[in-house]
Image (cartoon, grey):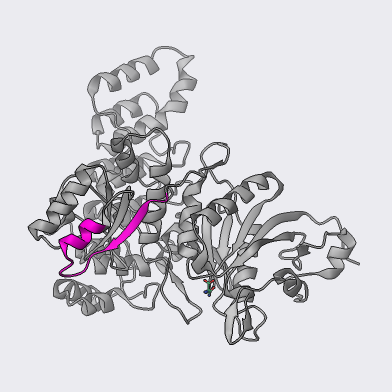
Amino acid sequence: MARATEPERRLLAVYTGGTIGMRSEGGVLVPGKGLTTVLRSLPMFHDSEYAQARGLAEDTLALPPASPGQRIIYTVLECQPLFDSSDMTITEWVQIAQTIERHYEQYHGFVVIHGTDTMAFAASVLSFVLENLQKPLILTGAQVPIHALWSDGRENLLGALLMAGQYVIPEVGLFFQNQLFRGNRVTKVDARRFAAFCSPNLPPLAVVGTDVIINQELVRRIHGKDTLVVHSNMERDVGLLRLYPGIPAALVRAFLQPPLKGVVMETFGAGNGPTKADLVQELKEASERGLILLNCTHCLQGTVTADYAAGMAMAGAGIISGFDMTSEAAMAKLSYVLGLPGLSLEGQKELLAQDLRGEMTRPVSAECRPSLQGGPLRLGLAHLLSLSQEAAAVRDALMPSLACAAAHTGDLEALQALAELGSDLSLGGADGWTPLHAAAQGGHTSTVALLLQSGADANARSDGGLSPLQLAARGRHRGVISLLRAAGACLSPQELEDMGTELCRLASRADSEGLQAWWQAGADLGLPGYDGQSALHIAEAAGNLEVVSVLRGLLGTESNAQDPGRALYD
Ligand code: ASN
C-alpha cells in the first residue's frame, strides 16, 4: 500500500500543443488533445496506486517516487485550443504567464509543454514578462510525438518535471535532451535531431547524466522576497531585420516605417553592416525619429563589438548593442522595455543596454563594484569605526564590504588601515565575496599578493560559486592567475569539465589572450564545446591562424593541471 503522507512537491504543467502531443491526420501532424490520458497510461509518468490512495483529481498525476520520501504531483492544464507553436504569439505567452500568476502560490514549480518551433521565443518572452520569478518554470516539448515508440518526448517531459520538482532554479529554463538551458539564451538549431536546441553563448544551467550536475555559478539568485510581477503590456510593434550583402536602402526604409517602434537588426559578424551612405542615412534617420535599433549578430556564437569601421555605431549613437543576445531574446526584450509605462526614449535605451534577466553577457569592463576611492570617505569611515566600543559591532558588519571595495580598486593603503582596525581580510561579505575575489577581479597583483600573504583562502567560493581564479581568468589578469595558482588555487573538476563551450566562444572571437588565461588557470584546451567541436576546430574553420598557432602551442605543452605553481607569463 502506498504511503499517503510522503512530502510532496506540487507542479503545474501547462500543455499548449506542439509535436509532443500530436497525432497524424490525413498524413500530417496536428495538435492532439488528451495528453493527460496518454501520461496516465505510462507508469513512468503516473503511479496510479499512490494517486488512488491520495484521492488525486482526474487532471492530477503522481510521478513514481523521485528520491526516497519525496513525491512530485503534477496537475496538467490543457490549453484550448492547442497550437502548433508556429501559431503562438505574445498574446498566448502572456496568457500562460497570467495562468502561472493565478496559481503561483499553489505550486512549487511550473512546466510549459510547448512546440519546439517557437519555444525559444516563448522562453524569452516569459523570462521578461515574469519579473521576480522565485520558482522554476521549465519549457519542454519533443521532436517526435510522445506515444511513438522512439520518442524524445518522454525523456524531455520527465526531465522537465524532475528539474522543476527537485531543484531550486528560480528562472525560466528550457529542458531538452538532458540539458537545462536558460530560456532566453537558446535557439532552435535542428529540425530533425533530438538535440534541437543550443545555448551558444552560455553553458547549460544543468546537465543530466549518471549524476545531475547543476552549474550553480550560472543559476540566477533570488534577491529579497519581491513578489511576482507579470508584465502583460508587451509592445507588439517590434520587428526583425536581417541585413544581407547589397540590401537596398529603399527596402530598409520601407521596413522601418511606423507603426514599428523597435527593430532587432541581425548584422554581420561582430555587429557590422554595409557602409553605403544611403543605407547608413536610412538607419540614422530612423533612429533620429525615435525608432529603437538593437544590434545583434546573425552569427550563432560571439558578440557585437565596436572593433570595425563597418560597425553599426557609424549609423549614429542611436544603435544599441545587443552583445551576445539571441534574436529571440532581443525581440522579447524590446517588446518588454517598449511596453513599460512612463519611460523616456533615453530610459528605454538605458534599460536595453542592461542585462535584465541574464539574457546577455556585458563586457567585463562594464561590470563594476563599489569603490572606496576618494580618501575623505575612506578616512572618515576609518575614524568613525575606531571611535567607540559600540562601534565594534558595526565595524565587524561593515569590514568585509569595505575591504572588498578597497581590494577592488587595489587600494593597499586602505586595506592596511582596515587590517590595523582589526579587520580580518580573509573574511567574506554577505554574498561570500572576499577581498581576494575583488582584487582578482580588478587584476591588482600586489593586492592579491598582500591578501594571500595575510592568509586569504586562494580557493574561496562566493555564494554563487565563483572563485578568485575564475575572476582573474575572465579578466585575463595573468599576473594574478600566476599568484593564485602558486597559492594552490585551481578550478573544480566540474568547472574544468564545463569549460568547453566557453573556450569555443573565445576561439570564435579570436580571443587568444582569453584562451591563454584559461590555460594558465588550468583549463584543458582540447575540451569540446556544446556541439562536439573543440576551440582548435573552431579557430581552424574560421581560418584564424594566430589563434590556431597559440592553441597548437599550448596543446602541445604538457598539461598544466597538475602543476599549480607554473606560470607562463610572469
Ligand atoms: N511544429 C511543431 C511545433 O512547434 C514542432 C515541434 O514541436 N517539434 O509545434
- Residue 486, quarter of picture: bottom left
Judging depth in this view, the residue of 120 and 178 nearest the camera is: 120
Q: Which residues are magenta?
A: 236-254
**In this picture, is 444 found above or below 384?**
below
Q: Could you tell whether 81 is left or right of 56 in the image?
A: left
Q: Estimate the x, y position of residue 480 in percent, counting from the top left.
A: 26, 51
Q: Could you tell whether 345 is left or right of 82 in the image?
A: left
**In this picture, is 493 found above or below 379?**
below
Q: Could you tell whether 283 is left or right of 40 in the image?
A: left
Q: Estimate the x, y position of residue 516 in percent, counting from the top left.
A: 23, 64
Quadrant where the C terminus sits is bottom left
* Number of numbered labels in the structure image: 0
Judging depth in this view, the residue of 314 and 497 nearest the camera is: 314
Residue 220 is at least partly visible in this image? no
In the displayed orientation, state which residue is furthest to the right.
1
Quadrant where the N terminus sits is bottom right
Q: Estimate the x, y position of residue 305 in percent, counting from the top left.
A: 21, 56
In reply to whether residue 64 is colored magenta, the answer given is: no
Q: Residue at point 43% right, 77% down?
A: 190
Q: Estimate the x, y position of residue 58 in percent, counting from the top left.
A: 82, 63
Q: Residue at point 26% right, 54% down?
A: 256
Q: Residue at point 33% right, 45% down?
A: 352
**In this picture, is 238 found above or below 302?**
above
Residue 41 is at least partly visible in this image? yes
In the displayed orientation, state which residue is furthest to the left.
277
Q: Residue at point 45% right, 16% down?
A: 391
